[in-house]
Image (cartoon, rainbow, N blue to C red):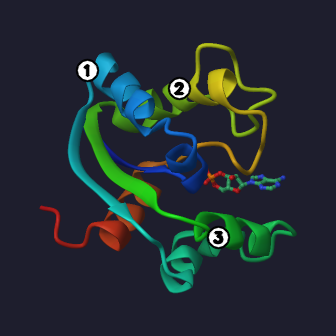
Amino acid sequence: DVQRALVLAKPDAVRRHLVGRIIARYEAKGLDVIALELRRVSVTLASQHYAEHVERPFYQSLIDFITSGPLVAMVIEGEHAIEAVRAINGATDGVKAAPGTLRGDFCVSNQQNLVHASDSPASAAREIALWFPDLR
Ligand code: CMP
């Protein structure tokens, strides 16, 4: 079934000039970019986005990082898009992520890990409504 996923190319991706290569991998897979915006994220939006992590020890540092500079938010659509995007991204920790994945190829951190992607249809619906409220 056709799904939509929210993807954030995080501030490290923008700083390291990797955004083009990140988008190219989703496109090469046959997925569609149906919304895209470069934006600076407020602490308010960041805390709504990461609400489920509020009790984690790394929460404050996660908010500091995601608001540290512009990021590129996008909605990716296609067949099984949520699972397909997560396969392209690789495991959360860049050290453990398989070579060939974005994180496996381009980072060594579990926080500055280039991308965020929705992990389920429910989180995709919530995140897309949060980041792209006007998208139909
Ligand atoms: P993301 O998919 O954006 O969702 C939650 C984020 O928390 C995750 O990617 C990482 O960037 C970050 N994260 C997860 N685990 C840790 C950790 N142990 N230390 C610091 N950051 C983490």
Work out which quarter of the rendered image holds the C terminus and state it.
bottom left
Q: Residues within 10 Å of mark 1 (few under 14, many from 20)?
A: some
| 80 horizontally vs 43: left or right | left
Q: Residue 85 at what x, y percent from top left?
A: 44, 33
Taking the image as drawn, is residue 92 in sight? yes
SS at circle 2: helix
- Residue, far top: 100
In the image, is 33 to the left or to the right of 98? Answer: left
Q: Is the residue 34 above or below the residue 132 in the image?
A: above
Mark 1 = which residue? 30
Q: Earlier in the sequence, mark 2 or mark 3?
A: 3
Residue with the mark numbered 2: 87
Question: Which badge, 3 or 1, is on the more N-terminal residue?
Answer: 1
> Who's the residue at 66% across and 43% down the image?
113
CA gap, disc 2 and disc 3: 22 Å
Instruction: Please report contact status of discs 2 and 1: CB closer than 8 Å, yes or no.
Output: no
Q: Is residue 119 visible?
A: no
Please give the residue where the numbered disc 3 appears in the rendered image: 52
Q: Mark 3 belongs to which amino acid?
A: Glu
Q: Position of residue 111 (x, y in %)?
A: 74, 51
